[in-house]
Image: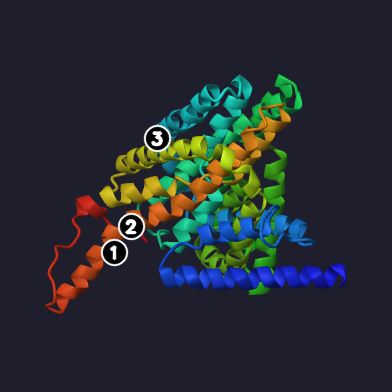
Amino acid sequence: MSDKALLFLELGGLVLVLGVLARLAGTLRLSPIPLYLLAGLAVGEGGLIPLVTSDEFVEIGADVGVVLLLLMLGLEYSGRELIAGLRTTAPAGLLDLVLNSAPGLIAGLLLGLGAVPSLFLAGVTYISSSGVVAKLVADLGWLGNRETPVVLSILVFEDLVMAVALPVLGAIALGGTLVGAIAAVAAALAAVALILTLAARHGEQMSRLAFAGSDEVNLLTLMGITLVVAGAAEQLHVSAAVGAFLVGIGVSGEAADKARVLVTPLRDLFAAVFFVFFGLSIDPATMPGVLLPASVLVVVTALTKMITGGVAARRRGVGRRGRRRAGTALIARGEFSIVIAGLGLAAGGDTRLAPLAAAYVLLTAVIGPIAARLADRPARSAGRLGRLSSKGEATAPAPTPAEEGPPAPG
């Protein structure tokens, strides 16, 4: 069989399986993310049916998936809203940094990984997965919730911290100079500040100029701008996902409404590929020896993320259920954590660092969506009881503002 034929067969079979899993998740009223991750484990190294020729294509598709996920999130908010959110969320962001990096640092030292690998493990436990969170809030219908801008502000704060930390960690890993790391940090922060300023002041005018043609022209223009900015962001040591998010922020008004319709099908396809690739990159054989410490880290950092999300949402006047949703949405770790673990290995770290990070990330990526679904269940139960009461079959009080918080504007 030719390589091209095998490539099409593998990709076609994989996409068909993803369709079946998405249908199953819909039937079970769950996010499909855990099923996608398990599918990736099944076709990865050491899995049941390893991919032979399509793994490189899947990797590229996964990168595009993260970019599209964050682009769609950015389209939901304006530059002014984001800047205001960052100002309000800064104290919670600093709390997030302390609470969620400390467990990794302490665990690394207790496990005898050494000071430098423990520093990398702190980065692994600190940062939530933008890709998983973006998919999660879309799947659960949380985009219009009052806590969602809070969650996004924390994610952006974390990515800005990574814009500072990754060049420094990269210099440690690759033996680079401190001056080079500082220059990379300055360039990254300047680029983010410039794009946010332009988006806040001129987003609507730029959108009208750039997206005034047919759907074909608009889609090609948006995808081209997004990929170029994502590549430039990656070069400046800001993640490509952050670059895509900032492009979405810059598209405003009617153009943003059109863009959401055009990009949604592409996002759904490539996002599924991203989660499959994430599972594909993990060798199941490396897991058993690190499951215990990884599980302990999961429990501790799930609680600290719940605290972070709850504090940030409460500062914005969100009710109890919204605070629970904000906390659970942040539990999952993902792409950034794997990158940081890879840098730790390049720095000559303990060989246990990679499987420990992989097991930790996989567990949080599976548990996070399930916890988020459970956090939203009381509100759904109350809604069902309310509908029953209208038929005279049951009675239940409606949720109070203190429980749910007022509806999101718009």
Quadrant location of the C terminus in the rendered image = bottom left
Residue 357 versus residue 307: which sits nearer the camera?
357
At label 3, counting other C-alpha atoms closer than 10 Å, the crowd grade (few under 14, some 14-19, many 20 or more) is: many
Q: CA–CA distance between discs 3 and 1? A: 28 Å
At label 1, the amino acid type is: Arg
Closer-to-camera residue (42/81):
42
Which residue has dot 3 on it?
A: 92
Q: Is residue 123 above or below residue 360?
A: above
Give SS at disc 3: helix
For marks 3 and 1, the one nearer the N-term is 3
Give the residue pinned by disc 1: 380
Which residue, given by chain and number where applicable, does mark 2 sit on? 376
Label 3 – label 2 distance at C-alpha: 22 Å
What amino acid is labelled 3 in the image?
A: Ala
Residue 340, placed above or below residue 138: above
Q: Classify 65 as above or below 100.
A: below
| Rendered location of residue 301, percent (x, y) | 44, 37
Disc 1 + disc 2, Cβ < 8 Å: yes
